[in-house]
Image: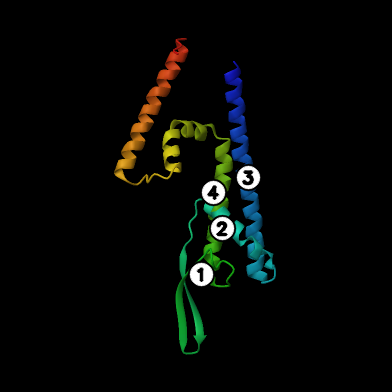
Amino acid sequence: MFIGIMLIAISLIAVSYKATSNFFKYRRLTSLKDTYENYITQKSDWSVHGNQQEIIELFKKAGLKDKTVLVSEMIDPMHINNAYVSIFDNMMKFKGEIINNMHSLFCQAIGVYKRRCFDSINPLYWIDFLLFLPQKTIIYLGFNEGSKTATAIIKTINVIYWISSIGAAFIKLMHISFV
């Protein structure tokens, strides 16, 4: 009985943490997007410069990667400098290519956090999470899921996990205990 109550408490804590954490990231990124857009349109709110690292961190936590874009700059009437630049490193520049990509990154990241908020209260998400827990753990540990060997190992571990989980549930249902 005590173990059941503990599992329910841990589950509620996990759901609450995931929902709250992603909701605050969603709200914060929405606020930073508004500040960034004010900075770009009015060229006045310089406080966004102090939030550049936070913006990058929130993008990365949403799974978004830095991109490079081609930016052209006129050096003098006879010369134009073309260069590929990082969006993350140059987000405060008033260049159309960077501004468009930043808008896209903000929208994507906000969408990711919004979806994660809904996932946190979706029972199907948690069932999927539990069914593929070994796979998610192995990927989290940094194994390359793209290689055929890693894919085979992940699938094998998932099958062992499923069989052992079904076996443990069956034993529990039959009231057979083993030491």
Residue 112 bears which disc, if any? 4
Residue type at numbered disc 3: Phe
Tag 4: amino acid: Val
Mark 3 secondary-structure assignment: helix
- The answer for how far apart the CA atoms under marks 3 and 4 are is 11 Å
Q: Is residue 29 above or below residue 84?
A: above
The percent position of residue 72, horizontal first and vertical second, equals 48, 77
Residue occupied by mark 2: 56
Q: In the rendered view of the protein, which quadrant contains the N terminus? A: top right
The residue to which callout 3 is attached is 23
Spatial CA span between label 1 and label 3? 29 Å
| In contact (CB < 8 Å): disc 2 and disc 1 | no
68 on left or right of 111: left
Residue at disc 1, secondary structure: helix
Disc nearer the start of the sequence (4/1): 1
Q: Earlier in the sequence, mark 4 or mark 2?
A: 2
Q: Mark 2 is on which residue type?
A: Ile
Q: Which residue in the structure is indicated by mark 1? A: 97
Residue 74 percent location from the top left of the image? 50, 83
Work out how far the residue at label 4 is from the one at label 2, CA to CA, in angstroms: 15 Å
Three-letter amino acid code at disc 1? Glu
Q: Earlier in the sequence, mark 3 or mark 4?
A: 3
* Residue farthest to the top, as pictured: 175
Q: Nearer the viewer, mark 2 or mark 1?
A: 2
Q: Quadrant of residue 51?
A: bottom right
Instruction: Name which residue lies at 46% across and 11% down.
Output: 177
